[in-house]
Image (cartoon, grey):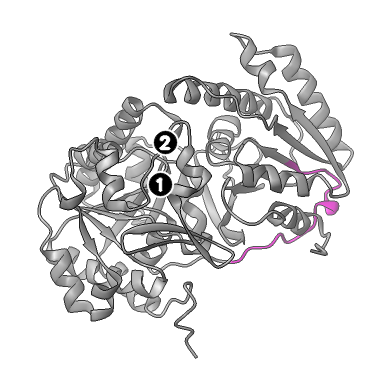
Amino acid sequence: MEDIKNPLTRPFKDEIRSLFFDQQLTLVIVDDDPTGTQTAHDVPVLGHWTEQAFIDEFKNKTPLFFVLANTRSLTQRKASERAREIGQNLLKAAERTGRRFLVISRSDSTLRGYFPSEVEALSEGAGLGNLPTLLIPAFFEGGRITEDNVHYIMEGGTKIPVSETVFAKDKSFGYVNADLTKWVEEKTSGRIRHEAVKSLSIADIERGEEAIFDKLDSLGEDDVMVINNTTYRHLEKTCMVLHWLIKKGKGFNFRTAASFVSAFSGMGPLSWHPQNSSSSSGLGGLIIVGSYVKKSTSQLEHLLKKKGIKAIPISVEKIIATEILNEAYLEEMVQNIETCLIAGIHAVVYTSRNLISGDSPEESLAIGEKVTGFLVNLVRNIHVQPAFFIAKGGITSNDIAVKGLNMRRAKVLGQIIPGVPVWELGEETRFPGMPYVVYPGNVGDAESLARVYDLFTANPSKS
C-alpha cells in the first residue's frame, strides 16, 4: 500500500520515465559541485566540458549525464564564464549531432551558489533565449522542503527555515531570507522584486494537473517561479505537466537541487554496498575531510573513535602561510598516508577545524582554493592505490576527482547511504575502478560518516 505521508514515495516514477524517454532528448545536469548525483545511479559524470565530450554523449544518445562545473569554487565572474562556455559547447555539440538536449543548473539544497547569474549565463550560452526560470531547491532525502514559498530543513521532525541555519551564514554565499520570493529579490539586488516572483503552491498542485498546467503555461519570458513541494508526490505531479509543456514547445530554465533531477527523469537512487571488505586487498582506505561545516566536524569526531584508523591532521595555517606550495610538509603527509595504506591502516586526513576566512567573499574563496589545492597535490603524489576513497565536502571531492585523480568520465554506482553517492572511476584515472565516495558536507547525522567507514571495513556499526 502506498505511503502518501512518506516524502520519498514515488507514485508516478514509471509514468514519468516513459514521458522522459519519449522526449528523445538528453538531460544535461550542470553541477556547481559534485553532489547532484545524490539521487542518481548508472549514469555518467563528466569531469570536463569540451565540445567533443558532449558530442560523444549525444552520439551515444545518453539519456542523462552530469557535468562537474564546480562553479561554487569560483568567483561570480569566473562562474558565469564557465557556465556560458558549457552552454556554448552543448549548443555546438547539438548542432553537430542533431541531438536535442535539456539543461538543468543543479545547485545546493541550502541555497548556496550563484543565482541568477549562473543560470542566465548557461541559458545564454546554450542559445535558449529568454525563458521563465523555475526555482526548485527540494532535496527530500536530506530533509529540504519548500512550503508557502519558505525553504526549510527538517531536523528531528522540526521545520527550520534555512535562513536560521549555518548555511545562511556562508562567507561566500550567505543570505537572510528563507522566503524564496524574498531570496530572489535579495540575490538579484532588487532587480526582481519579491512581489513579481510567481509561485506554484502545494494547493495548486493538489488541485491537479490542469491547475499546474495553467500556472506553468502562463509564465512569461524572464518570470521566476518558486515550485513548492514537501514530497516526491508533489514534485512528480509537477514534472509530468512539465513534460507535457516541453513536448508542446514551452521552454524553461531550471535552478534545482538533486531531487528534481530524479523526479523529472523517473530515475531513483540505488542502494550500493561494497562487494568486498578492504581486508581482502590488505591495503588501507583513504578518507579526506575538507568540509569545515559543523556537521562535518561532528561526523569526523565520531569516525576518529573507530578502530583501524590513523588520524592525519593538516594545518590550514601552514598551507596558507606560504605563497608557494610547502613541499616539505606535503612530502611528510604523503609518506604518512602511504605508510598507513601499505600497512592496512585506514588514513583519515582532515584539515584543521578552525575556519579561516578572508575579509570578502573573494578572499574566502581564495583561501579555500589554496587549501583544496594542497589536498589535490597530496593525492597526486600518492602512489599506493587505496582500498577505497571517501572525500568529504563538495568542492573537495570535485577537485580531488578531477585534478588529483585525473577523472574525465565516471559512472554513478548508487548511494552507500541516502544522499551519499559512490562513483566508479574510469580507466583514465590514476586509480581505475576504485570506488570513490562523494560525501557532501551537509548530509547525514553525527554517526553517518562512521557508518560508511563500517560498510567498507566489514565492521558493522553498533550505533
Residue 203 versus residue 334: which sits nearer the camera?
203
Q: Which mark is residue 62?
A: none
Find out whether the residues at labels 1 and 2 contact each other: C-beta distance under 8 Å. yes
Evaluate whether residue 132 shows in this view: no
The residue identified by callout 2 is 173
- Name the kind of residue labelled 1 in the image: Leu
Residue 132 as seen in the image, left or right of residue 448? left
* Magenta segment includes 91: no
Report, in whole angstroms, how far the alpha carbon at label 1 lies from the one at label 2: 8 Å
* Magenta segment includes 280: yes
Residue 100 as seen in the image, left or right of residue 290? left
Residue 25 percent across, percent down from the top left: 27, 59
Residue 256 percent across, percent down from the top left: 35, 53
Residue 163 as seen in the image, left or right of residue 313? left
Mark 2 neighbour density, 10 Å: few (under 14) some (14–19) many (20 or more): some
The residue identified by callout 1 is 111
Q: Residue at x 48, y 38 (%)?
A: 169
Q: Residue at x 20, y 53 (%)?
A: 197
Residue 167 versus residue 425: which sits nearer the camera?
167
Mark 1 neighbour density, 10 Å: few (under 14) some (14–19) many (20 or more): many
Q: Specify the quadrant of the image occupied by residue 219.
A: bottom left
Residue 134 percent across, percent down from the top left: 25, 55
Q: Tell me if residue 189 comes above or below residue 3 in the rendering.
A: above
Q: Tell me if residue 200 comes above or below residue 109 in the rendering.
A: below
Q: Main secondary structure of the magenta part?
A: loop
- Name the kind of residue labelled 2 in the image: Phe
- First in sequence: mark 1 or mark 2? 1
Q: Residue at x 38, y 42 (%)?
A: 176
Q: Please state, as top left, top right, bottom left or bottom right, where the C terminus lies in the image.
A: bottom right
**What's the magenta region?**
271-286
